Amino acid sequence: MNLSEEQIERYSRHILLQDVGVEGQMKLLNAKVLIIGAGGLGAPAAMYLAAAGIGTIGIADKDKVDITNLQRQIIHFTKDINVSKVESAKEKMNLINPDVKVVTYNEFLMANNIREIIRGWDFIIDGTDSFASKFLINDACVLENIPFSHGGILRFDGQTMTIKPKESACYRCVFIKPPPADVVPTCSQAGVLGAIAGMLGTIQAAEALKFVTGVGTPLYNKLLSFDAKTMRFREVNFKKNKKCGVCSENAVITELKDEEQVACDLPAGN
Amino acid sequence: MKVTVNGEDTVIEKEQLTVTELLKFMKVDMPDMVSVELNGSFLERNNFETTKVKDQDSLEFLYFMGGGSKLG
């Protein structure tokens, strides 16, 4: 496959980059990236990945667009209220870039279906909001050996790390197990500044593009966090946890199970 | 004693204290929402109360953050 004249124009700003070039753009067009969650993080990630020409983008979400989403989930428009999020996201991605094949999963990802759904994707973006989901995605990606980007946001803060199973520390290495259910609901009133979702989701998209093209150094073995109130960014470095329940030599998790849902959720949506 | 918390030097007028006490001292209001790395190793939350922090120790408090969309 060669790039068409239109593609050479469309992707000219990528092709101009010495580290990317035609070869890198071809890698992007042949890549498959799955975004789990078409919400605050998934929305900007999906738009940038579509614009970048990721050849196949998967998007998984069970929700419909709600008016409370529109303050930050920029892939959904006012006209999309009550439309399924994956259909709304697919429409925008195709409008941005008809080169992209979008695969939708209008379903909950649970212990019994996640491994099958993620199998075959090159890279995964975790754009979910509950800790049970984050651990489920982590464990599934480790067991299936698929690299992924973790992202979290709260109020004015964001955090992200990129995980290459077996080689770099995983989410469970750092966070070990979900927080107790009874302490989490207090963040249901916490809220989030809309642009924080854009900042973090865009970092996740950049990590996916770096991974696919092989450019630069992914956020392996480090958690990047920022506080938008001061706009201070900080990196915490670490190593794989030798006692990690899923990715260490002493791993005890060899099969997935659904944990109690502990969402850091807003009452009317996410 | 002097410890480093999230990269910043912190002086505490005690010779020793537990991780739980340090979280309280640092005014962390939801200690269950924090993962603690002590001198490069992550601690189990169950061990916060028994793990001692000593002079020159280095700690990172990493916060649980959700965000994004409900389970896929």
Image: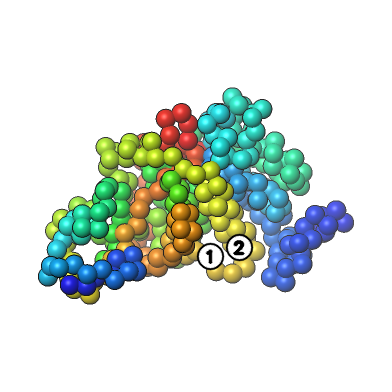
Please indicate, yes or no, whether residue A223 appears anywhere in the rendered image: yes
How many residues crowd mark 1 within 10 Å: few (<14), some (14–19), many (20+)?
some
Q: Mark 1 points at which residue?
A: A218
Residue nearest the viewer, comparing A32 with A231: A231
Per the model, the C-alpha gap separating discs 2 and 1 is: 7 Å
Q: Mark 1 lies on which chain?
A: A
In the shown orientation, is residue A100 left or right of residue A129?
right
Residue nearest the viewer, comparing A31 with A40: A40
Question: Where residue B54 appears, x then y in whole percent?
Answer: 17, 70
Q: Quadrant of residue A9?
A: bottom right
Can you name the residue that lies furthest to the top here?
A82
> Which residue is found at the position 46% from the left and 28% from the top?
A268
> Which residue is found at the position 64% from the left and 30% from the top?
A78
Q: Do the residues labelled 2 and 1 touch (CB within 8 Å)?
A: yes
Figure check: A62 above or below A137: above
Q: Name the residue under label 2.
A: A210
> Which residue is found at the position 40% from the left and 68% from the top?
A237
